[in-house]
Image (cartoon, grey):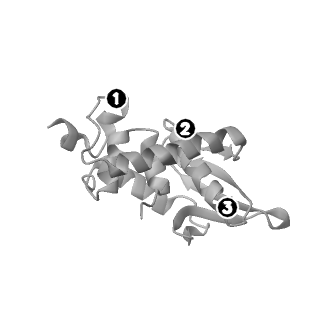
Amino acid sequence: MIRVTGTLIWYYFICKRQVWLMAHEINPFQNDPFLEIGRFLHAESYAREKKEIEVDGMKFDILRSKEKGSIVIAEIKKSSKFLESATMQLCFYLYRLRRIGIKARGEILVPQEKKKFEVDLDDEKIVKLEQAIVDIKNIMQAKKPPEAKKINFCKHCAYAEFCFS
C-alpha cells in the first residue's frame, strides 16, 4: 500500500524528485549542516510544549489544547522561505485529522524569525492537497525519479550531491 506522509507533502511542494527519493528510502546526507540546524531548532525551541506526538501514523512537532477543548497542531520550521510547503504539510495533517473526526487548526512556528503563521484548512487547500496526493502516488510508483532540475532550494538541499555530482 502506498502511504503518503506529511514529509512527502512537504517535499512535493519543493521538489518532486525528493518525493521519489524519500519514498524509495534513499535518504539525504544526514550530516548536512542544514539538517543539523533543523534538528537543533526542533529540539531546543518550545521546550515546554508537548513534542513529537504521533496520531494515526502522523507525527506532529507540537500538539496543544486551547480554550474550550480546541486542538492546535504546530510544525516548527527553520525558515519561512518555504511557507507554501509547510502550510500544505500542516493542511495534510488537518485533513487527515478531520477524516477521523477530529477538528483542529494549525500553526507554523519559525523560532529564528520569531514568527507564527495560522493555518486553517479550507476548500481550496483541500482540492490542492487531494491533487498533490494523487501526484505523489504517481511519482512514488514511477520506476525512476523525475529529472533533477536546478531550483533555488538546491543550494541548501541534503540531496544536492546525489542530484548534481
Disc ID at residue 59: none
Question: Of residues 111 and 31, which is closer to you in this image?
Answer: 31
Q: Residue at x 59, y 62 (%)?
A: 62
Q: Pointer 1: what residue?
A: 151
Q: Pointer 3: what residue?
A: 99
Left or right: residue 58 versus residue 72 is left
- Name the outermost residue toward the left: 165
CA separation in Å, label 2 and label 3: 22 Å
Asked which quadrant contains residue 64, the reply is: bottom right
- Tell me the SS state at disc 3: helix
- Looking at the rendered image, the quarter that the N terminus falls into is bottom left
> Is the residue marked by circle 2 packed among few (<14), some (14-19), or many (20+) residues within 10 Å?
few
- Sequence-wise, the earlier of marks 1 and 3 is 3
Question: Of residues 158 and 27, which is closer to you in this image?
Answer: 27
Disc ID at residue 84: 2
Q: Residue at x 41, y 52 (%)?
A: 38
CA separation in Å, label 1 and label 3: 34 Å
Q: Is the residue under label 3 in contact with that under label 1 (CB below 8 Å)?
A: no
Left or right: residue 66 versus residue 40 is right
- Tell me the SS state at disc 1: loop
> Is the residue marked by circle 3 packed among few (<14), some (14-19), or many (20+) residues within 10 Å?
few
